[in-house]
Amino acid sequence: MKISNAEYARRRRKLMAMMAPDSIAIIPAAQEKLRSRDTEYPFRQDSDFYYLSGFCEPGAVLVLIPGRAHGEFVMFCRERDPATELWHGSRAGPDGACDHFGADDAFPVTDVDEILPGLIEGRDRVYYSMGRSAEFDRQIMGWVNSIRSKESSGASPPGEFTDLDHMLHDMRLIKSAAEQKLLRRAGEITASAHRHIMRYCQPGMFEYELEGELHHQFVRGGARYPAYLSIVGSGVNACTLHYVENSSKMRAGDLVLVDAGCEFEYYAADVTRTFPVNGRFNAEQRAIYELVLAAHGAAIAEIRAGNHWNQPHDASVRVITAGLVKLGLLEGEVDELVEAQAYQPFYMHRLGHWLGLDVHDVGDYRVGDEWRLLEAGMVMTVEPGIYIAPGNTDVARKWRGIGVRIEDDVLVTASGCEVLTADAPRTIEEIEATMAA
């Protein structure tokens, strides 16, 4: 289950069709990053580079030149080297970049300083995302300045730099049928892992034991890596939004909030479930959980093509505010409390974010001054939550330290939406039954 070379080629053609005449686009690959002395972090390709090529090696450069007679897709990459490959694995090499990844021309990346300035020279515009890599920024400007230094001899430097992000990220925002399949599979693997740890969880375990079980299930499903640092926060740790220490012992009577998703073929899942360590919600936990679940349902009911990005969030805010009033955690008229954002001490983040090659995926949330309208093929998270800080003396002690978040991945469809992670138990009845089993 992968993206086909034909789809990568379609993406490149679509991007080039949006580029100005006599222009060039330059996209560098990610670099390997040192972890400690002689070891590196696991390599993960730059998402934009991968989206246009499917090429997974570091240190490469992808170049698109619409209308170039000798081929519009040029790649610079590492050469084959049997001695190095013996230690670190095979490389595609320039021939492989052409034969297996569809490049029209490919050169050793060691020749990029010699060849790429000649490809830039005479172009009116360079599309490049400045500011991501200081080292590559300097390299780009060095090539341009070398062309400028030869203007008196007839060289023609580019007259304009344009950020590539807007066009490319708008493309990435709408997922193709193949991308939807990968996101659906990532969601299935992740939902299965969440279901597994509900059955596995016992009082007295450490949070990192659940984290280990999650990652084990990801790998068993074919997803080698989590899409982000997994959060396993029990008790008051659930009230820290980005808690990743995962080092506390879990106690009977506490909730545990687990925010974790796998990455499958570069596509991310992002799921949160909150459940009782001992398998049974108490009265206060149940009340807060049911309120978050109601907000979750209200938000999903607003996800359909033609509605704007903020409508699901607004729906969740209204449900949570009304519920907090009903529980006595807020006082006043719901409309006035919403207007005053009185819910923010309990619900301080937005409902969700785009999802795709990045867990917080690319794409604007506003177009001009207006919220973006949802379109079929967009994928977003829905993650309302309520967090009652242990030091919040404005509420009764019985509520303090309860943190609940429920998060799913949702695909906008032509007729409404599809919850890609629905297999992860979500209702109280489903959770308690799963844990009892």
Image: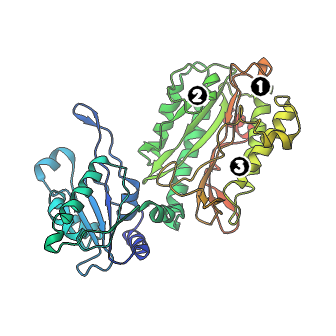
Q: Which residue is labeled 1 in the image?
A: 282
Q: Pinpoint residue 422: horizontal percent, then vertical percent.
A: 65, 50
Q: Is residue 80 left or right of residue 281?
A: left
Type of amino acid under label 2 = Gly
What's the distance in space between the residues labelled 3 and 1, CA to CA?
28 Å
Residue furthest left as drawn: 83
- Residue 170 shows which numbered tag? none
What's the distance in space between the residues labelled 3 and 2, CA to CA?
24 Å
Type of amino acid under label 1 = Asn
Q: Is residue 434 left or right of residue 48?
A: right
Type of amino acid under label 3 = His
Classify 10 Å Cα crowding around label 2: few (below 14), some (14-19), many (20 and above): many
Local SS, label 1: loop
Local SS, label 2: strand
Query: Is residue 100 placed above or below 77 in the rendered structure?
Result: below
Labels 3 and 1: the sequence-earlier one: 1
Q: Which residue is labeled 2 in the image?
A: 233
- The C terminus sits in image quarter: top right
What's the distance in space between the residues labelled 2 and 1, CA to CA?
18 Å
Q: Is residue 274 left or right of residue 94?
A: right
Q: Which residue is labeled 3 in the image?
A: 313
Q: Pinpoint residue 3: horizontal percent, then vertical percent.
A: 42, 64
Q: Pinpoint residue 195: horizontal percent, then vertical percent.
A: 60, 40
Classify 10 Å Cα crowding around label 3: few (below 14), some (14-19), many (20 and above): many
Where residue 196 sits, quadrant-wise, is top right
Residue at (49% x, 58% y) in the render = 182
The reply to whether residue 101 is visible in this rendering is yes
From the viewer's side, name the closer residue of 327 and 373.
373
